[in-house]
Every structure is written in C-alpha cells, then in structure tokens.
Amino acid sequence: MAVDDSVLTYSDMLDYVTALTDGGARTKDLRLFKEAILGAYKDIAMAAEWDYHMDEGRVDLDANQSSSTITYDHTGGSSERLVTIAAGSWPTWAKYGRIRIDDVVYSIEDRKSSTTITLDEDSNPGAIDVAAGTSYEIYRRVYPLPSDMWRLYDVAVEKSYWVPHYITPTEWLKRERFSTSSGQTWAWTIMKDPDSIGRWSLWVDPSPDTAEPLGFIYRRRPRTLRWAGTETEARTYTASGSADASTITTSTALPASMVGSVIRLADSTTTHPTGLAGTYPFLEQHKITALSTTTVTIDGTLSTAYSGDKIVVSDPIDMNDTMVEALKAQLEYRLSRFSNDARDMASAKQIAELELRRALEAEARHMSYRTSGSFSRYHYLFRHLGNTITTDTDP
C-alpha cells in the first residue's frame, strides 16, 4: 500500500521554511533551517503522550543456569579472570549476564568460548582462585529495550498474565545483592544499557528460572530526520519501473540508511517532484522497504511506468495530521528565537501554544454514546464472570 498523499516529509518542512523566510539554498540558510526543523520536531514529540507514538514491545527472558561446576583462574590460562565450566557450555547470552559464586555476584566481561567466560576487572573474586568443583549460578537480569524507547509503561508476563511492579534502581540493586533465589519475575526497573550508548534496558527481579516473554507498551521517539531531499544521493539519481511493479530501479544505488524513507516520483526526466504545495507535485510516493544495489523495494506498487524520471527521497515526518500544524507553529517560534526579535518571538510563542492545544484536543480518538445504564455483552461477561466461564448475553 502506497504512502498516503497527506504524509509530509522533511523536504516539505524545508520548503515550508524557505517559503516563510523567502530564503534560498545558501549553505548558511540551509543549516539554520535544518536546525530549526529538527528542534521543533523534538519539541512537539516531547510535548505530550501522543497516541501516535505508542508502540508495542517485547523482550524474551532467558532462564538461569546452574548445572555442572566451575573453576576460576585469576591470572593464568588463556585469559585473566577466567571462569571455566566443567561440563556443558555457557549460554550464548553469557556476556550480558552475571554469575553468582559462593553467594557473591560478579559481572561478566565476555564469553570467550562455549566453556570459558571472563569476569570484569572491577568485579571478580580477586587473586584467590576458586577451586575446581565450585557451584555457581549464571543468570540474566538486563535486557535491552527498543532503541527508539522514550517512556515505558506497565510490563506484563505474557504466559501468566502477571503484571510485575516497578521498583527504583536502588531497590533493584539491594534485591540482587541480598536475594539469592530465582523465580517468577515480579519487579523491574529501567537503567542505561551497559553495552550501548544512548539506549535503555529493562532490569528484572528476581532472575528468571524459566524462559518466557515480557510484553509492554512504550512511547517511542519519532523516526530520525536524516534525508532532507537536498542531498546529492536524494535528488540526482533517476528511477525506472513498470506499472504495478513493487520495485524501482535507480540509476545509482541508494544509501542503506534510506530504508524507511519516502521516495517521490514524477513523470519528468528534467523536473524534480515537489510536495503538494509545490510547483510540480509528485505523482505518487512510497516507503522504501529494502535496498539491494540499484533495486528499490517499495511498500506498494507503481501506478504507472517510469523511465529515467526524477526522484526525491526524504524522511517522513513521523507525526499524524493533527500534530503537523503544531509542528509548523513551533518551527516558526524556533525561527523567531534565532532572529532575536522579542516582539516576533512573543507572538510566535502564543501561536505555537495555541496550535499545541488544538493538537492535544484532537487526541481524543474514541467517542462512546452509551449511557451509564447500558452495557455491552463484553461488560456483562466481565461483571458476572465470578471465576466461572459463562456465555450469558445481555438481559
């Protein structure tokens, strides 16, 4: 299915700013305009709990392991701080886990092989080696959350419909240090992911004794605006394709980061397609779903044939239509701040706040006309369930 014509792109916002300021393509102007767009985009995304930015997530918990025994060699062997398992193998996720030896928890630095792991330099038993035959427990309590997560809501254990509780990071640390048992996850917290910059992780308690999924709803960040449609790669290549085809052939391979971007097509070999408010509106636009050399896979099919025609590739504005006017007003406010005109700034701020209120009012997407005494079969079943499955209908 093709991208709806109402979907705007980074390129559209740049054209909007250019029209507002009667600006040109000078490098200085272009940099200023992009800074204003990116700033306003982030402002609106952070302004509210937008329904449009709610998404579903899931992490799969890994069961702990305590089979066999271990030997710890602090300085010798193939690596320092080396833990060797006597039988079996370390789980593939071992580098993300922790190991409990004699009721003390240590952090794992790396999984060297199926039978060896190394402990962190600042978290290990020290110079006294652990004798062969020592018992252990390796577990995983840290799970990366989606890279675009901004806020996490309630977490649910999918198999048992259990909703664990949120605890503070300090409480989580206390429980990990003083609780030695594994079992059903009943609590969680959020901290920075120890293995990634700018990413958050889910830290669960206690360590799971069975592998099971956790599901959750989270508020995501909107898609990053990278391609503005002014770059060489975004507008100098041409495209060809047959009607009803789900692929397009470009004259030169597009960059991999354009997957997820919007490609606009025109029936011209000399004129680039513009937005609907431009002088040469695009004929159709599609989301790029995959790239392989010069073959571009799109989310729908072409409505007509193209042969060496101009294209423009740009990132979509990841907001719905009721948010876009707030974005435009916030963009104007950003530009007024750059100009340092106090009077213009005050006026632009008032307009931005008005458009934001209008967008927030439009967030109510459900309207029910049921009266307080009227119940659907769904309501009736849940009011009369009483731990007994029933097929009663409304009285």
Image (tube, rainbow, N blue to C red):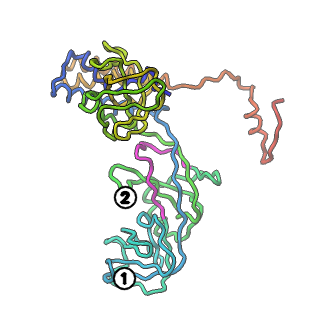
The magenta span reads 140-155
The residue that mark 2 highlights is 194
Eyeballing the image, is 153 above or below 122? above
Q: Give the left or right position of residue 249, taking residue 56 as reference.
A: left
Q: Secondary structure at mark 1?
A: strand
The residue that mark 1 highlights is 73
- Looking at the image, is mark 2 or mark 1 earlier in the sequence? 1
- In the rendered image, residue 60, in percent from the top left (x then y), is placed at 53, 55
Looking at numbered disc 2 in the image, what kind of residue is underneath it? Pro
Q: Secondary structure at mark 2?
A: loop
Q: Give the left or right position of residue 237, taking residue 375 as reference.
A: left
- In the rendered image, residue 262, in percent from the top left (x then y), is placed at 38, 29
Crowding at label 2, few (<14), some or many (≥20) Cα neighbours within 10 Å? some
Is residue 359 on the magenta stretch?
A: no
Q: Residue at x 39, y 20 (%)?
A: 325
Eyeballing the image, is 156 above or below 122? above
Magenta highlight: main SS: strand
Is residue 143 on the magenta stretch?
A: yes
Residue with the most extreme top position: 279
Does the residue at mark 2 contact the one at mark 1 (Cβ under 8 Å)? no
Q: Residue at x 46, y 23 (%)?
A: 243
Q: Give the left or right position of residue 169, taking residue 272 as reference.
A: right
Location of residue 234 by image quarter: top left
